[in-house]
Image: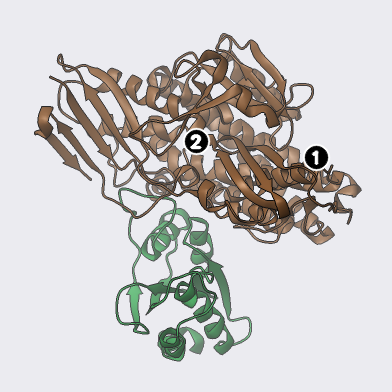
C-alpha cells in the first residue's frame, strides 16, 4: 500500500496545495493502490499508518522558492528535534514508525512553493499550473512500487 | 544586587512562553514569572460579528481543543436563545466533549510528559520526547498513539470531522449520530478502556520514583474550581461551579456559571499577555485557584462511573484533604481518561442516542449569554453581549490556562528554590522548571496565540543587563 500524506489548510490559499496534490495523485494511481490521508499537520498517529505502508509520499506547500516551483526529495528517518512540539516533520514520522513499529518505509517529500497564503479557498494561478509537474515527479518516484 | 534567569521558550507545551527567575542579593530565588509573549485578540475582533457565527469562529482558536471552544460557545448562544436543547443533543455534546478530553489528555500524557517520567529529568533532551519514549517502551508509545486516535475517531464519528467541526450550533447540534457511527465508536472502546487501565496501573507503580517531583512541583495550599453535577458528581459539559479549599471543604457550591464575574476577577500584569484570574472574595493575588484535572477530582464528590470511582478513592489517599501537588495533574489526567472512556460507553447505550431530534429552533431572546464547560485544561467560559440584530458588542473569554496562571508562577518559583544552586544553570533544573509548567498542560494558543518557533535560550543576567551565564538548546 502507498500512503499519501496530503498536508495543509485548504482555507489558506496555496497552503492547500498538498491536499489538491493528494487528490490529483490518487486519481492517477490504480484503484485501491493508495491511501490518502489529509491533515493540517503531521501527528504521531501518522507514524502508525506510515509503518503499514510500502512507501509514503508527503505532499506539502512551502514558502521558499518562486511561486509554483516544484521540488521532490527523498526523506530519511531520523530522531526528533530537541525542542519537540506536538507536530512532527516527515523525517520524524518515519523515525517514529521505525522505533515504535519496527518499520520505516521509503519516503518522498514533494513541495510546491506558494504565493498566496491568505484566507481564500483557491490556489494561485502559478501553483495551480504546477500541479501536473508535481504529480509527475511523485509518479516517477512511485514507478518501482507500482510495477510490483 | 538582583539577577535574572531566563528560559525562553518553554518546550513541549502548546504555544510559546518564557520563564524568568529573579535572584536576590544573596543569590536566592526571589520571584519567578511565567511570561506569555504572544497575543491573539479573539475577544476584540469577534465584536461586530453575528452571535450565530461564534461557535465556528471560536473553535478556530485552537487545533488541540477546538471542541471545547465549540461547546462553550454553542452553550453561550443557547443562553442567548433562552432554549433548553433536546436531551439527545445534550448527550451528544457530552460524548464529543469527553472524546476531546481523552485525546487531549492522551497527547499531554503519552506524547509530551511521559518521556520525562520514563526517561528521567536528567536524560539527554535529544531523546526525551515521543521518539525516545518509543525507543525504550514502544508498546506504551503505540498504545498512547492509538488511544489518542480513538478519541479523534469518536469526534469524527459524532461531529463529522476531527479538527474544527462546525457541528454544535445555537440550539443543539447540526446532525444526529448514525448507527454506523455509534458502532464504530463502540468497536474501539474495549481497547481504549484497556489502555487507560493499564497505563494507570503503570503510573501508580512508578509514583515512588517521583516522590521529589510530587513534593516540589507546585505543592502548595490553594483553592480549586470545577463544574460539578447536581449531586457533586464529575461533570464536564454542563453543571454548576464548585470551589473547594486545601482541606477539601466546599467553599462555594452550585454557583450559576452565568454569575462567574461575581466570583472570578481578572487581573492583568504588564509582563504577560495572559490574564490572572482569581477568586474575588479572597482578593488578588491571594485568591489563587487551580482548574483542570486535579481541580476536578478535588472538587467532585464522586466520579459517577464504576472504575473511575474506584481510582478516585485511591487517588484521594495522596492528600489529607485536597491533593495539593500539581505533579498529580498527570495522575488525575489518567483517571479522567478512564472516566471519559467509561462514560462515553454509558452515554451511547440508550437507543435514544440515535434520535433525530437534536436541534431547538429559536430567535434571540436575551442580550447576554454565558456558556461554560470543562475543557481538558479546566473550566472555560464564553460570555457574549449583543445589540440589535444579534450583533456582538462585547465578548469575554475566560480560558482554562489563564486560570492556572497564578499557580504556574508559584510552581516555577517553588521548583527554582528547590533545585537552583548558585548562578549556574543545569539541564536538569531547566527541564524540571519546564516540567512544572507542563504538568498544567497549558495551551497558550487558546489564551493568546503561538507565532513561530524559537530555539531555547537561557540567560542569567545581572543588574544593567550584564550577561553572567547563558545556555541554549
Q: Residues within 10 Å of mark 1 (few under 14, many from 20)?
A: few
The chain under label 2 reads: B
Please provide percent x and percent y for residue B197: 63, 35
State whether residue B197 is above or below residue B409: below
Residue drawn at (59%, 46%), measured in percent from left and top?
A: B103
- Colour of chain B in the image: brown
Tags 2 and 1 touching, CB below 8 Å: no
* Residue A143 appears in the rendering: no
The number of callouts visible is 2
Q: Which mark is residue B401?
A: 2
Please state which of residues B339 and B98 is positioned toward the viewer in this rendering. Answer: B98
User: SS class of the residue under badge 1?
Assistant: helix
Q: Residue B346 carries which label?
A: 1
State whether residue B295 is above or below residue B55: above
The chain under label 1 reads: B
Q: Which mark is residue B122?
A: none
* Chain painted in green in the figure: A
Residue reaching furthest to the front: B388
Q: Quadrant of the N terminus of chain B?
A: top left
Label 2 and label 1: CA atoms lie apart by 29 Å
Q: Do labels 2 and 1 share a chain?
A: yes
Please provide percent x and percent y for residue B136: 40, 44
Please provide percent x and percent y for residue B229: 76, 27
Residue drawn at (73%, 38%), measured in percent from left and top?
A: B342
Residue drawn at (43%, 73%), measured in percent from left and top?
A: A60
Tell whether B448 sits left or right of B102.
left
User: SS class of the residue under badge 2?
Assistant: helix
Please provide percent x and percent y for residue B33: 33, 29
State whether residue B265 is above or below residue B62: above
Please state which of residues A39 and B28 is positioned toward the viewer in this rendering. Answer: B28
Amino acid at each position: 500500500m502507498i500512503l499519501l500524506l496530503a498536508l495543509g489548510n485548504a482555507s489558506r490559499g496555496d497552503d492547500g496545495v498538498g491536499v489538491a496534490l493528494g487528490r490529483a495523485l490518487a486519481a492517477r494511481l490504480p484503484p485501491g493502490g493508495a491511501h490518502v490521508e489529509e491533515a493540517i499537520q503531521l501527528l504521531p498517529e501518522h507514524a502508525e499508518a506510515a509503518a503499514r505502508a510500502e512507501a509514503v509520499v508527503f505532499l506539502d506547500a512551502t514558502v521558499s522558492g518562486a511561486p509554483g516551483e516544484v521540488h521532490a526529495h527523498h526523506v530519511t528517518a531520523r530522531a526528533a528535534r530537541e525542542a519537540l512540539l506536538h507536530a512532527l516533520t516527515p523525517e520524524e514520522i518515519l523515525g517514529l514508525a521505525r522505533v515504535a513499529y519496527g518499520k520505516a518505509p521509503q519516503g518522498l517529500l514533494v513541495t510546491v512553493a506558494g504565493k498566496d497564503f491568505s484566507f481564500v479557498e483557491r490556489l494561485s494561478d502559478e501553483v495551480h499550473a504546477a500541479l501536473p509537474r508535481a504529480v509527475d515527479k511523485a509518479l516517477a518516484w512511485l514507478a518501482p512500487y507500482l510495477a510490483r | 544586587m538582583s539577577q535574572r534567569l531566563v528560559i525562553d521558550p518553554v518546550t513541549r507545551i502548546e504555544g510559546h512562553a518564557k520563564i524568568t527567575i529573579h535572584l536576590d542579593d544573596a543569590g536566592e530565588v526571589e520571584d519567578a514569572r511565567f511570561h506569555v509573549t504572544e497575543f491573539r485578540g479573539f475577544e476584540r475582533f469577534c465584536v461586530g460579528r453575528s452571535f450565530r457565527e461564534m461557535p465556528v469562529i471560536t473553535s478556530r482558536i485552537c487545533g488541540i481543543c477546538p471542541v471545547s471552544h465549540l461547546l462553550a460557545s454553542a452553550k453561550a448562544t443557547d443562553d442567548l436563545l433562552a432554549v433548553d436543547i433536546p436531551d439527545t443533543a445534550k448527550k451528544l455534546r457530552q460524548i464529543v466533549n469527553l472524546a476531546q478530553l481523552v485525546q487531549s489528555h492522551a497527547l499531554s500524557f503519552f506524547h509530551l510528559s511521559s518521556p520525562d517520567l520514563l526517561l528521567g529529568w536528567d536524560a539527554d533532551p535529544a531523546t526525551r520526547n515521543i521518539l525516545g519514549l518509543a525507543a525504550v517502551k514502544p508498546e506504551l508509545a503505540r498504545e498512547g498513539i492509538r488511544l489518542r486516535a480513538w478519541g479523534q475517531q469518536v469526534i469524527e464519528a459524532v461531529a463529522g470531522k476531527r479538527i474544527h467541526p462546525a457541528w454544535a450550533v445555537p440550539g443543539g447540534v447540526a446532525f444526529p449520530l448514525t448507527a454506523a457511527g455509534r458502532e464504530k465508536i463502540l468497536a474501539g472502546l474495549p481497547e481504549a478502556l484497556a489502555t487507560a487501565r493499564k497505563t494507570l496501573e503503570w503510573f501508580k507503580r512508578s509514583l515512588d520514583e517521583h516522590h521529589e517531583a510530587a513534593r516540589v512541583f507546585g505543592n502548595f495550599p490553594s483553592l480549586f474550581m470545577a463544574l460539578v453535577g447536581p449531586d457533586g458528581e464529575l461533570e464536564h459539559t454542563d453543571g454548576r461551579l464548585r470551589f473547594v479549599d486545601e482541606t477539601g471543604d466546599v467553599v462555594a457550591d452550585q454557583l450559576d456559571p452565568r454569575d462567574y464575574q461575581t466570583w472570578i476577577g481578572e487581573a492583568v500584569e504588564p509582563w504577560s499577555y495572559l490574564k490572572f484570574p482569581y477568586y474575588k472574595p479572597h482578593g488578588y493575588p491571594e485568591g489563587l485557584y487551580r482548574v483542570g484535572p486535579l481541580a476536578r477530582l478535588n472538587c467532585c464528590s464522586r466520579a459517577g462511573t464504576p472504575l473511575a470511582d474506584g481510582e478516585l478513592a485511591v487517588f484521594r489517599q495522596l492528600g489529607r484533604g485536597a491533593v495539593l501537588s500539581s505533579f498529580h495533574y498527570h495522575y488525575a489526567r489518567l483517571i479522567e481518561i478512564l472516566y471519559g472512556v467509561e462514560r462515553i460507553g454509558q452515554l451511547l447505550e440508550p437507543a435514544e442516542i440515535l434520535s433525530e431530534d437534536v436541534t431547538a429552533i429559536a430567535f434571540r431572546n436575551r442580550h447576554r449569554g454565558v456558556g461554560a464547560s470543562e475543557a481538558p485544561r479546566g473550566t472555560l467560559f464564553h460570555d457574549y453581549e449583543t445589540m440589535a440584530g444579534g450583533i456582538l458588542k462585547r465578548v469575554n473569554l475566560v480560558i482554562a490556562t489563564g486560570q492556572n496562571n497564578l499557580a504556574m508562577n508559584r510552581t516555577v518559583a517553588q521548583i527554582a528554590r528547590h533545585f537552583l544552586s548558585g548562578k549556574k544553570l543545569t539541564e536538569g533544573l531547566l527541564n524540571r522548571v519546564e516540567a512544572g509548567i507542563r504538568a498544567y498542560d497549558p495551551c497558550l494558543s487558546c489564551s493568546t496565540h503561538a507565532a513561530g518557533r524559537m530555539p531555547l535560550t537561557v540567560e542569567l543576567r545581572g543588574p544593567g543587563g550584564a550577561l553572567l551565564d547563558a545556555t541554549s538548546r
